[in-house]
Amino acid sequence: MQKTPADRILMLLKMRGEVTAAQVATELLITKEGARKHLLNLANQGLIESYARSEGIGRPSTYYCLSALGLSKFPDSHADITVQLLQSIKQLLGENALDLLITDRETKVYQRYKNALSGMETLEKKLDMMATKRTEEGYMAEWKKEAESYLFIENHCPICAAATECQGFCRSELHNFQQLIGPSYTINRIEYIIEDGTRCTYRITEKK
């Protein structure tokens, strides 16, 4: 089914975190006035919020981001049942059983990604494949170069409820990323969805 301009703007905001009307116009190939009209409609529905930011000389620029209602348009998969199952495991079998479950998942995920990355020697090729795999799994992943480091960005977390209930899932994923990228690089999480971030972002820096 073809996405409406409103759907595309919401997706753009989810991917970028914030945008201006000019950026929306460029992405959707429409006029700035048309972009402003769509953004105003979304704001009136409570799906987005706007704020002004001064960027040097001249008038402040207006930026738009998703509201809490807008973020709810990208739901966690089967969130309630997942949380209930995790709580039951802890109550009936104890924390050790939950740790074993996370470790087992970590091992299986690592092996799957290791196989996908087989033969890829450069970091950028690895990041391309990891972004593709993570996007297939619902993380809306991308990467970009920033000065002397790389940013690996996950714009959505399909297991957010599970990760909030048990942060062992997040530690497990960070550990896997470090193993997959290799010992020549340091990886630090600098944005975190479960700590009120709009996305999870990892900074990857080559060790000197």
Image (cartoon, rainbow, N blue to C red):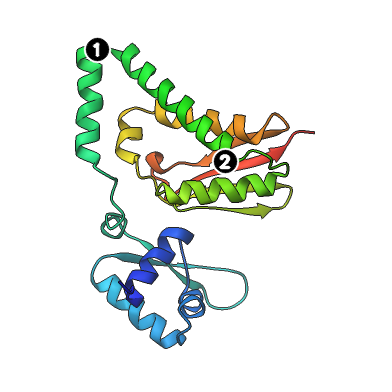
Number of residues whose C-alpha sits closer than 10 Å to that of mark 1, classed few (under 14), some (14–19) or many (20 or more):
few
Of mark 1 and mark 2, the one earlier in the sequence is 1
Work out whether 78 lies above or below 146. above
Rounded to the nearest angstrom, the CA distance separating label 1 from label 2 is: 34 Å
Q: Nearer the viewer, mark 1 or mark 2?
A: 2
Q: Which mark is residue 152?
A: none
Q: Is residue 87 above or below residue 144?
A: above
**In screen coordinates, is 148 left or right of 170?**
right
Count every numbered label the image shows and give the total: 2
**Where does the image place residue 11, in percent across and percent down from the top left?**
39, 64
Numbered tag placed on residue 93 in the rendering: 1
Q: Are marks 1 and 2 in contact (CB under 8 Å)?
A: no
To which quarter of the image does residue 5 belong? bottom left
The type of residue carrying mark 1 is: Leu
Instruction: Give the side of residue 52 with respect to residue 146, left or right.
Output: left
Residue 162 shown left or right of residue 92 in the figure = right
At x 34%, y 40%, the residue is: 160
Q: Which mark is residue 116?
A: 2
Could you tell me which secondary element the residue under label 2 belongs to?
helix
Q: Position of residue 156 (x, y in %)?
A: 40, 50
Query: Residue 65 location in percent, x, y?
Result: 40, 63
Q: Look at 44% across and 50% down and name the residue there.
A: 136
